[in-house]
Image (cartoon, rainbow, N blue to C red):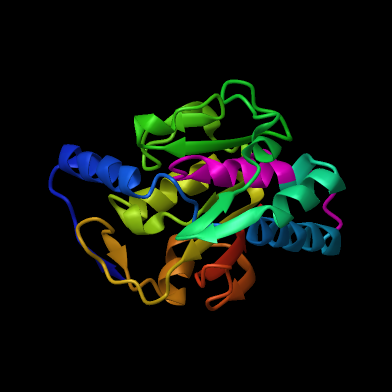
Amino acid sequence: MDFQRYEESSVYETRQVDRSEAKFSWCKTSYRDVYRYLQIIKRDKARRSDQTVAGPIACLGVRNGREVDLFRVALSSGWFRRYLVSCSERKWHGFTPRIPIAEALGRSEVQKLSDESCIGVEINPAGRRSDVWTGSFDALPDEWDQKFGVVFSNAFDHAFDPSQTATSWLRILRPGGYIVFQFSEDQNSCPLEPVGSLSMDDFRRLFPGELVHYCLGGSARGYTEYILRSKT
């Protein structure tokens, strides 16, 4: 793993907000990715006779928040809405909706977590919504400790400190919960994306637990996928 350390957190935060602004209008995750991840988790739970629900779900580093909407639709919506969201998605840089209202209905509230809640974390204040907490995913609220059944992110390359970030993410995951993780396999570190060249060994060291799913370049955008179940 390559890592470029910032000496000042204020400089890091300013650059990350600027980076978020530059990519704010699109999402790197497709609905098809999200639906497939939840199906993998569902099968793993069934194999282990685990009858607990998957949620609540936290998505970290969400920019405009679309991936929060995608997880909410995939987790708790009826078949017609899921079909509509899947069919109306278009690829443009990343992925964007042709029918935004189909994804936006029924958003969660950060302050009212339930089993069906899907919330986001975004450092850019422009991403503020009822279901998005504004702040760093390196310093998540203490009241979230062991609250989430799934933690998803494709933004680990933006971590201020990889070890601190992994600890923060695992802290909010309940025992037996799942880390769903996308990372560009060939990405090198740079000042805007401080973490690069993440290997399987790096991931396993940072996120201990049982690897449920791994696919090299498996996401719709070609990112490598990891799904890990934390220790109970």
Residue 14 appears at what percent x and percent y? 21, 39
* Residue 215 located within the stretch drawn in magenta: no
Question: Is residue 54 in sight in this rendering?
Answer: no
Which residue shows up at 42% across the image and 49% down it? 167
Horizontal side of residue 219 vs 52, given as left or right = left
Viewer-nearest residue: 142 or 26: 26
Viewer-nearest residue: 202 or 218: 218
- Which residue is at the far top? 111
Horizontal side of residue 188 vs 55, given as left or right = left
Please identify the quarter of the rendering in which residue 174 is found: top right
Depicted 174 relative to depicted 95: above or below: above
Question: Is residue 13 in sight in this rendering?
Answer: yes
Horizontal side of residue 118 vs 82, given as left or right = left
Q: Which residues are magenta?
A: 49-73
Quadrant containing the N terminus is: bottom left
Residue 63 appears at what percent x and percent y? 43, 42
Which residue shows up at 70% across the image and 39% down it? 102
Please identify the quarter of the rendering in which residue 216 is found: bottom right
Depicted 20 relative to depicted 134: above or below: below
Residue 202 appears at what percent x and percent y? 40, 70
- Which residue is at the far left? 7
Which residue shows up at 34% across the image and 45% down it? 20
Depicted 120 relative to depicted 156: above or below: above
Report the label total: 0
Please identify the quarter of the rendering in which residue 32 is found: bottom right
Which residue shows up at 77% across the image and 62% down it? 44
Residue 21 appears at what percent x and percent y? 32, 42
